Structures are given as C-alpha cells and as structure tokens.
Image (spheres, rainbow, N blue to C red):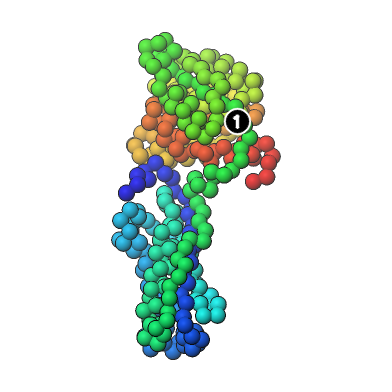
Amino acid sequence: MVNITKKSNSLRIAVATATVKVSKPETIAAIVQRKIPKGDVFEFARAAGLFGVKRTSDMIPDCHPLPVEYTAITYDIQDLKVIINVEVHTIYKTGVEVEAMHGASVTALTMYDMLKPIDKGVEIENIRLLEKSGGKSDLKNMQFPDIKAAVMVCSDSVFEGQNEDRSGKVIVSRLADFKIDTSHYEIVPDSIESISKMAKSVIAQGFDILILTGGTGLSPRDVTPEAIAPLIDRNIDGIMESVRRYGQDRMPYAMLSRGIAGFAGKTLILTLPGSVRGVEESIDALFPQVLHLFKINKGQKH
C-alpha cells in the first residue's frame, strides 16, 4: 500500500457512473413499476452499492480503509439505459475515487443479476469516474505570482561552524519543488538583535516569503519568536496551529514549538523548528496551500 502518513486530512469527494442497458422497453417499465420478480431493483441495487462503497478496501488490495461519511446513489432512465451515479464523501488523507467506482459497479451488477431472468440482453457499460475533488491535487493547476523567497537559519552552532546546516537546505530544496527560487540564504546566531536585523533587511528588500528555521523551542537561546513577533503586523495563528496539529499526530513534542507566522508588510514570515524532521513535517502541513495567501494579500480573486 502507498504510504499516506505524510498527507493531511481534507474533504474529498468523488462521483462515478455506470450504465445498465436493457434490450426492450418492457424491462424499463417493469423496473419503474417495481414488477421485477426478484424485487425492487432500485432499492436492492442501492443497498448493494452502499455495501460496495464501504467494503472497497476488502476487495481492492491497495485501497486504504477509510471513513465513508456520505454516499448517495441515484438513477436516471434514458431510453433503454439506466444511468447510475454514485457520490462519496470522506474527510481523510486519500481520495474516494475507487470507492465511488466500486459502488457504481456493484450497483450495476446487482441490477444485472435482478434483470437477467426477464431480459437476456442486459449489458453493463461505461463504468467511469466523473469528477473528484479534495487534497493537494486541487492546487496543482493554481497560478501563483513569481515568489521571491528568503531562508534564514537561526543557530549558534551552525553560525560558528561547529555544525553543518541541514534544515535550511531542506527548505531551499522543498521550495524548489514548488518552482520557488530561494534568492537569499543566511545563517545567523541565536540572538534577538541578529535575527531581527536580518529579517528587517529581507522585508525591506521586498521578499514575498521569509522562512526561518531554528530557535522556536524552549531552551534559553531559543529566541526566534521574540525577535520576529514585533515585526509582524498581521498575525496568522492558524498557520502554526496547523503545523503543530500535524506534528502532534506524528510525535509527542510538537506541542512545545513556539513558532509564529504572519505578514510583515507584504512579506509572509514562517518560523519553523530547527530539526530536519520538524522542517519537513511543517512544509508537508502547509505547502502548497499556504501559497494561496499571496493571491489574497494582493487582492486577487480566488
């Protein structure tokens, strides 16, 4: 099975369809009039389709068990065809496309089984996905302005050459994955004065985003929030709340991070943990959806 532990829960919706084609008008009439010998085709097939949706992971080996929070199965008769539509919702880490298609196929097979005693020409055709939404795939085609990024590493040991920077380089690499070029990279010691001075310079140069790593914990030298807080004029508490919630699901100490986020003028500032794992999880929690802030901040329609 695909590893989905890095993904975040989101509302995911899928709609699938299948078509049952009969060979004579009398079959359609019998369906509508509830005169099929095996019973009410619509209701039996709907019940079977619901079971099909909920038991998809039992039948398809690579499908993850997931909470199905809504399913609707509807029918539309067009000449000699019964069009089945199955809509499935979940709030989870992965989508429900296969669940919707499995539900549509089981619904169609149930109809076939119930109709074949009176119509030997019944056929199932065109099982397919109509639409899907939810997850980061919704954002892949969003158009963002060119983003000018700066990365700042806050660490006494890295500044003094005792340790090599890893977390800052991870940020640069991950930004590159989103086609964002880091045009300013700086290492500063853990002091309010140094961090504040460098951040003010980045803001003055008109950078769109400044990401700091390190100094968000509780040791005496962790002062990044104290240095950055006076510069932020529009706090966005939800950003770091999302990071901490995402991290807390994966390790027990994420709640101790004191990271803050917000706009200083037109520069979005994010203060991330100093560990590589903390940085990676923070970026997984925020990107690319956080980039939508640039449209909002610049007054573009969304």
**Which image quadrant for residue 98?**
bottom left
Q: Amino acid at mark 1?
A: Ile
Residue 50 is at least partly visible in this image: no
- Which residue is located at x 41 percent, y 85 percent? 119
Give the camera-side residue of 26 and 264: 26
- Which residue is located at x 43 percent, y 63 percent? 101
Q: Is residue 175 above or below residue 43?
A: above
Pinpoint residue 234: horizontal percent, then vertical percent: 61, 33
How many marks do you count on the picture?
Answer: 1
Residue 135 is at least partly visible in this image: yes
The secondary element bearing badge 1 is classed as loop
The residue beneath circle 1 is 147
**Which image quadrant for residue 277?**
top left
Give the camera-side residue of 118 and 164: 118
- Which residue is located at x 42 percent, y 40 percent? 246
Q: Is residue 55 above or below residue 260?
A: below
Pinpoint residue 60: horizontal percent, then vertical percent: 33, 59
Give the camera-side residue of 268 and 42: 42
Crowding around mark 1 (Cα neighbors within 10 Å: few <14, some 14 to 19, many 20+) is some
Pinpoint residue 15: horizontal percent, then vertical percent: 49, 62
- Which residue is located at x 34 percent, y 37 percent? 251
**Which image quadrant for residue 55?**
bottom left
Give the camera-side residue of 229 and 248: 248
The residue most toward the top is 160
Pinpoint residue 41: horizontal percent, then vertical percent: 42, 81
**Left or right of residue 65: residue 152:** right
Q: Is residue 52 above or below residue 216?
A: below
**Left or right of residue 8: residue 227:** right
